[in-house]
Image (tube, grey):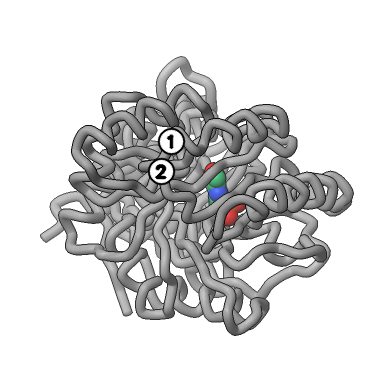
């Protein structure tokens, strides 16, 4: 039962369909890692991953031990790769919850090996390489040091090696291809010394953009949710957004011309105006920066957001919406009638990216799953 009509509708059939589209672009022995960090980019990590597993996805990627524990407690059994940075205190949890950490520093490698040895349990790791992201990863020299030190680090099993593209969303793919070349040179250094099961560099945009050798595992994030990974992909995909963000008008009121609306009186009516108050605000993740900028859909038509967005409510001008009534549905992201507002369009209004829009939809907005 919803007492407040603000919720996300997540269509899991779209998640499955988007995965199938990507699989058709891969070789038959390639595999997919579903990136479900940040609670599945706001969509809900567990239901999304369960849908992804039905499509043959074999790995899950998260960014913290806490996120991995949520998956394990939900009965997820596939290998989980910790994509984020981690701290020594996380080490026992890697063993308890069967988490594969990324390895990007000798110092952490030593600590991890020491613990593994102390409980006499080897641990699989994915070695992360620095190729142009400037975030986490061994540089070439550090990789050399690691290879030289590996004899001593005998409880670490190198299951995979990977890197991350910094610019796969650019239509000019030169930098990504350069990263890929550096990556494969470094992978070669490792492969000469150790057998490696998984080699991966491509994220969503990389899957369609990279032409060179791309490894055998693909880390699918934003495109799995049906969001465009970049505005100008050279090969656009026919993806479907899984998310629809709905709310409702909780009150309607006519105001005379020259009447102030909302905190700080940032909007003033220029004519007799019908204002709808909508039960969603910045505490739900509807950014305050969208004040006087964004639009919503009512009866399949666009209504502008007017005045400053409040914590729990926002106001829209519905003067031009025929037959509008209190309690009518409002679509913030998604399709209504013939029109659609995508997370990407919302992101463009405030100069951010679709990733941030869906990740920021707060946990107080209930998620409803269909299909
Ligand atoms: C290391 C890593 N791999 C893969 C992804 C997925 O990227 P995308 O959502 O663009 O597919 C991310 C997302 O930020 C990431 O940090």
Q: Can residue 304 be seen in this view?
A: no
| Residue at the outermost top position | 264
In-image side of 370 versus 314 (left or right): left
Percent x, y of residue 355:
54, 46
Q: Can residue 214 be seen in this view?
A: yes
Q: Of the numbered discs in the image, which one, if any, rests on residue 56?
A: none
Q: What element carries label 1?
A: loop
**How dense is the environment of label 2, judged by Cα within 10 Å: few (below 14), some, or many (20 and up)?**
many
Q: What element carries label 2?
A: strand
Label 2 CB-ligand 1 distance < 8 A: no
Percent x, y of residue 278:
35, 45
| Residue at the outermost left position | 1
Q: Considering the image in quadrants, where does the N terminus appear?
A: bottom left
Q: Residue at x 28, y 42 (%)?
A: 94
In-image side of 61 versus 199 (left or right): left
**Residue 256 in the image: above or below residue 196:** above
Circles 1, 2 touching at the beta carbon (< 8 Å): yes
**Residue 154 in the image: above or below residue 369:** above
Q: Of the numbered discs in the image, which one, if any, rests on residue 156?
A: 2
The Cα–Cα distance between marks 1 and 2, rounded to whole angstroms, is 6 Å
| Residue at the outermost front position | 151
Q: Considering the image in quadrants, where does the C terminus appear?
A: bottom left
- Write down the residue under mark 1: 153
Q: Residue at x 79, y 49 (%)?
A: 176
Q: Residue at x 59, y 49 (%)?
A: 162
Q: Residue at x 26, y 51 (%)?
A: 98
**Residue 331 in the image: above or below residue 317:** below
Q: Quadrant of residue 29?
A: bottom right
């Amino acid at each position: 039962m919803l007492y407040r009509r603000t919720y996300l509708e997540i269509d899991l059939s779209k998640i499955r369909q988007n995965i199938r589209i990507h699989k058709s672009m891969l070789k038959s022995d390639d595999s997919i890692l579903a990136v479900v960090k940040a609670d599945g980019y706001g969509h809900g990590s567990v239901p999304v991953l369960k849908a992804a597993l039905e499509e043959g996805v074999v790995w899950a990627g998260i960014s913290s031990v806490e996120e991995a524990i949520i998956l394990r407690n939900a009965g997820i059994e596939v290998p989980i790769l910790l994509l984020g940075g981690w701290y020594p205190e996380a080490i026992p949890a890697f063993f308890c919850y069967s988490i594969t950490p990324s390895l990007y520093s000798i110092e952490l490698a030593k600590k991890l090996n020491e613990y593994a040895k102390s409980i006499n349990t080897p641990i699989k790791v994915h070695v992360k390489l620095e190729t142009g992201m400037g975030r986490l990863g061994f540089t070439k020299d550090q990789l050399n040091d690691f290879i030289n030190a590996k004899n001593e680090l005998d409880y670490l099993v190198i299951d995979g090696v990977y890197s991350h593209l910094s610019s796969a969303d650019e239509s000019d793919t030169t930098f990504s291809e350069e990263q890929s070349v550096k990556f494969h040179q470094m992978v070669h250094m490792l492969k000469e010394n150790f057998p490696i099961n998984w080699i991966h560099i491509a994220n969503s945009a990389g899957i369609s953009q990279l032409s060179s050798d791309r490894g055998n595992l693909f880390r699918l994030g934003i495109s799995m949710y049906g969001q465009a990974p970049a505005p100008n992909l050279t090969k656009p995909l026919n993806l479907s957004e899984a998310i629809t963000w709905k709310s409702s008008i909780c009150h309607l009121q006519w105001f005379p011309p020259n009447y102030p609306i909302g905190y700080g009186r940032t909007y003033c009516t220029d004519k007799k105006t019908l204002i709808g108050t909508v039960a969603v605000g910045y505490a739900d993740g509807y950014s305050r920066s969208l004040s006087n900028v964004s639009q919503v859909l009512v009866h399949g038509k666009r209504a502008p957001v007017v005045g400053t967005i409040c914590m729990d409510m926002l106001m829209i001008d519905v003067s031009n919406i025929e037959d509008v009534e209190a309690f009518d549905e409002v679509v913030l992201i998604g399709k209504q009638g013939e029109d659609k507002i995508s997370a990407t369009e919302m992101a463009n209004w405030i100069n951010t990216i679709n990733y941030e829009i869906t990740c920021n939809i707060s946990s107080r907005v209930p998620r409803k799953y269909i299909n």
